[in-house]
Image (tube, grey):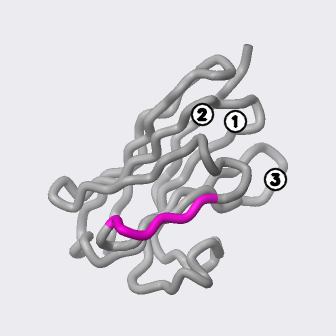
Amino acid sequence: QVQLVESGGGLVQPGDSLRLSCAASGRPFSRYIMAWFRQAPGKEREFVSFIDWSGGETYYADSVKGRFTISRDNAKNTVYLQMSSLKPDDTAVYYCAAAPGVSRWYATDVNRYNYWGQGTQVTVSS
């Protein structure tokens, strides 16, 4: 089993930056596709970003493209989400997710991920 633990959430003002971390343990981490999803109150969980096992391929939802950057450090079994120019619409619980060998076509699908963290709250408010 893979365990994922998110951290780094908090309360920030619009325009601020925040970096989320996801620490993985359990099964080997390196070959897993890692992703971030978020869920706002009353909404479905939505895709934010993913990164492949090598860190060479990334993809972002249109709503965060140009503002968020995903990265991973396989030596530390950790994936990050650097968030900049935060907006109130970014307010949500952010979840880290992992899946082995999912293709890019399906990597934005919440149902393709087998392992999930408990989430970390990000609140953007003035």
Looking at the image, tell me whether mark 2 or mark 3 is earlier in sequence order. 3
The residue tagged with tag 1: helix, strand or loop? loop
Tell me the kind of residue under disc 2: Val
Which dot marks residue 122?
2
Q: Depth check: 26 or 126 in front?
A: 126
Point out the residue furthest to the top here.
126
Labels in figure, total: 3
Taking the magenta stretch, the answer to whether it contains residue 118 is no
Q: Position of residue 25 (x, y in %)?
A: 25, 62
Question: Quarter-wise, where is residue 1 in the image?
Answer: bottom left
The residue tagged with tag 2: helix, strand or loop? strand
> Mark 1 touching mark 2, by CB under 8 A?
yes
Q: Which residue is mark 1?
A: 91
Q: Which residue is mark 3?
A: 43
The residue tagged with tag 3: helix, strand or loop? loop
From the image, state whether disc 1 or disc 3 is nearer to you: 1
Point out the residue furthest to the right here.
42
Looking at the image, tell me whether mark 1 or mark 3 is earlier in sequence order. 3
Tell me the kind of residue under disc 3: Lys
> Mark 1 touching mark 3, by CB under 8 A?
no
Neighbours of disc 2 within 10 Å: few (<14), some (14-19), many (20+): many
Q: Position of residue 10 (x, y in %)?
A: 53, 26
Compute the Cα span from label 1 to label 2.
5 Å
Q: Which residues are magenta?
A: 55-60
Q: Position of residue 121 (x, y in %)?
A: 58, 36
> Residue at point 45% right, 70% down?
115
Neighbours of disc 1 within 10 Å: few (<14), some (14-19), many (20+): many
